[in-house]
Amino acid sequence: MDVGSTAFILAASMAVALMIPGLALFYGGMTGSRSVLNMIMMVFGAVAVVGILWTFFGFSAVFGDSYGGLGLLGDVTEYAGLGQLVVADDSAALPPALVAIFQALFAVVTTALIAGAVSDRVRFGPWLLFAGLWATLVYFPVAHWVFAFDSSDGSVAGGWIANTLGAVDFAGGTAVHINAGIASLALVLVLGRRTGWPRAARPNSLPLVALGAGILWFGWFGFNGGSALAAGNSASVVFLTTFNATCAAILAWLLIEKLRDGHATTLGAMSGAIAGLVAITPACGAVTPLGALAVGAVAGAVCPLAIALKYRFGYDDSLDVVGVHLVGGLLGTVLIGLFGTADAPSGKAGLFYGGGFGLLGTQIVAAVAVLAYSFVVTGLIALALARTVGLRIAPEDEATGIDLTQHAESAYDLEGQLPAAPAATPVRTTETAPVA
């Protein structure tokens, strides 16, 4: 056993696990005060559902031997229940169980990302059902395409994007961010707009947003660095590029805000940080530190402009998952074809480093494939649930507030007393007016 790398991946897994409350706080602070708890519950609920499915068959579907060697889906029975990973043998460089939990955290965080696009209007029970179906039918197959590499001895066949196509995605620009972003758009189109949109509730707590973003930034070092699966040079380079891209994206977002709106905001700075982290996720092992600055700057400048498209085209992406994760993931994936360098851990050169157009074309094919599959299958899942169990809360529940009507709780005790649990007619609460 490689004790040093094992300790490193254990620490990286803990950092990624911290992204779960980080995401809940980041999203929770961005919602209105009557939606905070529901958003937190949607994140943690998705984590719980997908985590169980990962044990039953998810790990097998992602890392099992590909059916027919086609690279589309792993054998769902190969590691079913994960009992095969509980071994006393220490001969493997990394414990198989450690790889399983590290990748499980990718699956749960990716699914939870979608929650931010549909805040304020999804019934909690059907959301959990959607999370389970989406992970099974969308995330597990796509993760197999991207993360499952052929074994060195040829005994296990992996996914087609990683092996046949040969695209570069160090930590999940396609499987995580493009996948969750385009799925969010499909779900939003099925659900429709919130009542009164685009006039929606303002973020209830920018300090919560900043705290959540800071926790996510910390966790992202484990997310990206841990994807090296060893404590060494590759992980160190990834830490550096992840940091650089995030710094550049913050400043680029604030510059766009200042030029467009006349002021730079806290929400913009935090959103810029996430945009930079999203964009560098696939590219963190493919670019130089200067290349990372370029990737982050492009994401920080383009994502705030992309967010404005929801008002032009009329889709209600509540917390800008489409504008940040879809667009940021696309940028990071495609820019590898320009800024990739053979000297980086991924070892492939893009157009600006003498590699020609080949890698750029490969990256585009990978991005488009994930876009198309995830959008179509997510749309079908959402339509099926909407027409059977029903996804959206009732209009009167939306007006009352989703925290009270779905969970019988309120995040803030504004009147010095606990809210009464809703009976047949939910208790109606009002938010305090903002201080002038």
Image (spheres, helix red, strand yellow):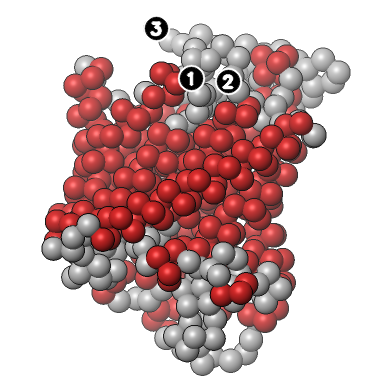
| Crowd around label 3: few <14 · some 14–19 · many ≥20 (10 Å) | few
Question: Horizontal and vertical percent for residue 139?
Answer: 57, 54
Q: Earlier in the sequence, mark 2 or mark 3?
A: 2
Quadrant of residue 81 in the image?
Answer: bottom right
Residue 327 relative to residue 346: left or right: right
Disc 2 to disc 1, C-alpha distance = 8 Å
Labels 3, 1: front one? 1
Residue 108's quadrant in the figure? bottom right
- Label 1 element class: loop
Viewed as shown, does residue 181 lie left or right of 252?
Answer: right
Q: Which residue is mark 3?
A: 436
The foreground one among 18 and 319 is 319
Q: Quadrant of residue 242?
A: bottom left
Q: Amino acid at mark 1?
A: Gly
Q: Residue at x 59, y 19 (%)?
A: 194
Image quadrant containing the C terminus? top left
Q: Is residue 198 visible?
A: yes
How many numbered marks, from 0 up? Answer: 3
**In the picture shown, does residue 35 fall above or below 105?**
above
Q: Residues within 10 Å of mark 2 (few under 14, many from 20)?
A: some
Q: Which residue is mark 2?
A: 193
Q: Which mark is residue 314?
A: 1
**Cα gap from disc 2 to disc 3, whole angstroms:** 29 Å
